[in-house]
Image (cartoon, rainbow, N blue to C red):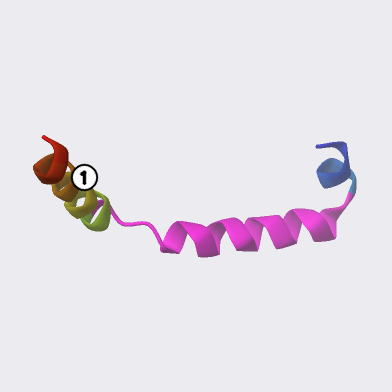
Amino acid sequence: MNRILREPRLQQQLSEASLNQAQKFSWAKTGAQTAAVLERFG
């Protein structure tokens, strides 16, 4: 954490990486995957 606070470039890299990761998420996909698990094991 201290390194992140001290290094603006690292902050920027992590920020960009987190936004890229967040774009992979969707509620529709999560709902479909949850429904599939519930159907299989429910």
Q: Quadrant of the C terminus?
A: top left
Reading the image, the residue beneath label 1 is 34
Task: Please give the name of the residue rendered at 18% of the width and 54% of the height, measured from the top-left corner.
Answer: 32
Q: Nearer the viewer, residue 8 or 34?
A: 34
Name the magenta segment's main secondary structure.
helix
Label 1 SS: helix
Residue 35 left/right relative to 5? left
Residue 5 left/right relative to 39? right
Name the amino acid type tagged 1: Thr
Q: Nearer the viewer, residue 39 or 10?
A: 39
Residue 13 left/right relative to 22? right
Q: Nearer the viewer, residue 36 or 30?
A: 36
Q: Position of residue 2 (x, y in %)?
A: 87, 37
Q: State which region is magenta.
A: 7-27
Q: Position of residue 30 (x, y in %)?
A: 27, 50
Q: Residues within 10 Å of mark 1 (few under 14, many from 20)?
A: few
Task: Please give the name of the residue rendered at 69% of the width and 56% of the height, measured from the top-left corner.
Answer: 14
